[in-house]
Image (spheres, helix red, strand yellow):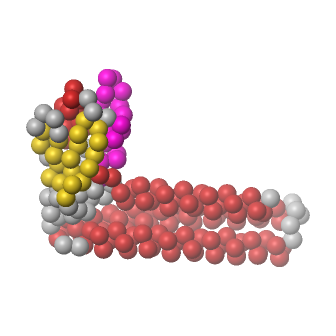
C-alpha cells in the first residue's frame, strides 16, 4: 500500500512536470519553434483538429515557421485559426505554403513573458504541493487504521517530502532555462 502511494505520487508529479513543459512550449520566445502552434486547432471538414494533423510544420530558420498543408483546401482555415489565436502572428499565404515570420521580441514583452513563465511555474509548484498533501493524507489514513506504525508514517512523509523537493528543483531548472531562452537577444 505504501509503495502504491509513493508510485502514484511520483506518477502524478511527473504528469505535473509534463503539463508544465507543454504549457511552456506554447510561450513564444524570440526564436521560431513549431511547438508554438501546438495549441492551434483547425476546422477540417467540420471537425476541430490539431494543426499538425493537417499540415507539416517546420522552422527552417530562427525567425520563420512554415506550414505546408497536405490538403490545399484547408489553407484558408489554417490561416483563420492562426489569426484567431492569441499568438499575435500574421500568416503569409502563397496558395501552397503559409509562412509565419516570428518578430523579435521587445525588452518589455520579454519581461512580460518572464512573468508569465514564473506564474506557470508557480502553478506547477502548487500542483506538486497538492499532490504531496494528498499523499500525506493517504499515509495518515493508514496510520490511523493501524495498518502502519507512527514511525513508518513519518518515514514515508519524509520520503514524500524529498520527492516533492526533487520535483520542485526540476521545475526551477525548467523555468530558469525558459527565462534564459526568452531573455536571449
Left or right? Give the position of 91 relative to 78: left
Name the image quarter holding residue 31.
Answer: bottom left
**Which residue range is magenta in the image?**
36-53
Quick check: 63 above or below 174? above
Question: In the rendering, at what x and y percent does residue 83 appear?
Answer: 19, 41
**Residue at 31%, 28% in the rendered image:** 44
**In the orientation shown, which residue stands out farthest toward the right?**
146
Residue nearest the viewer, comparing 62 with 135: 62
Question: In the rendering, at what x and y percent does residue 185 appear?
Answer: 18, 72
Please check the rendered image and state whether residue 12 is part of the magenta-colored stretch, yes or no: no
Question: In the rendering, at what x and y percent does residue 30 appear?
Answer: 21, 64
Asked if one can make out residue 50 in the rendered structure from this viewpoint, the answer is: yes
Asked if one can make out residue 134 in the rendered structure from this viewpoint, the answer is: no
Question: In the rendering, at what x and y percent does residue 166 appear?
Answer: 57, 74
For the N terminus, which image quadrant?
Answer: bottom right
Left or right? Give the position of 103 relative to 174: left
Name the image quarter holding residue 110.
Answer: bottom left
**Residue at 82%, 73% in the rendered image:** 152
Left or right? Give the position of 170 relative to 46: right
Please check the rendered image and state whether residue 46 is part of the magenta-colored stretch, yes or no: yes
Residue nearest the viewer, comparing 6 with 31: 31
- Give the number of callouts: 0
**In the orientation shown, which residue stands out farthest toward the top?**
45
**Residue at 17%, 48% in the rendered image:** 100
**Residue at 14%, 52% in the rendered image:** 101
Amino acid at each position: 500500500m505504501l509503495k502504491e502511494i509513493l508510485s502514484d505520487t511520483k506518477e502524478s508529479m511527473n504528469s505535473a512536470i509534463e503539463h508544465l513543459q507543454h504549457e511552456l512550449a506554447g510561450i513564444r520566445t524570440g526564436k521560431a519553434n513549431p511547438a508554438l502552434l501546438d495549441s492551434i486547432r483547425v476546422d477540417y471538414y467540420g471537425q476541430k483538429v490539431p494543426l499538425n494533423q493537417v499540415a507539416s510544420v517546420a522552422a527552417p530558420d530562427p525567425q520563420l515557421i512554415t506550414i505546408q498543408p497536405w490538403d490545399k483546401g484547408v489553407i484558408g482555415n489554417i490561416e483563420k485559426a492562426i489569426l484567431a489565436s492569441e499568438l499575435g502572428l500574421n500568416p503569409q499565404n502563397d496558395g501552397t505554403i503559409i509562412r509565419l515570420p516570428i518578430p523579435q521580441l521587445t525588452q518589455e514583452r520579454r519581461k512580460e513573458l518572464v512573468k508569465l513563465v514564473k506564474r506557470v511555474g508557480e502553478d506547477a509548484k502548487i500542483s506538486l504541493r497538492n499532490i504531496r498533501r494528498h499523499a500525506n493524507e493517504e499515509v495518515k489514513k493508514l496510520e490511523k487504521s493501524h495498518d502502519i506504525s507512527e514511525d513508518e508514517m513519518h518515514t514515508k512523509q519524509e520520503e514524500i517530502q524529498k520527492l516533492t523537493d526533487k520535483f520542485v528543483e526540476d521545475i526551477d531548472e525548467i523555468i530558469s532555462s525558459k527565462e534564459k531562452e526568452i531573455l536571449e537577444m
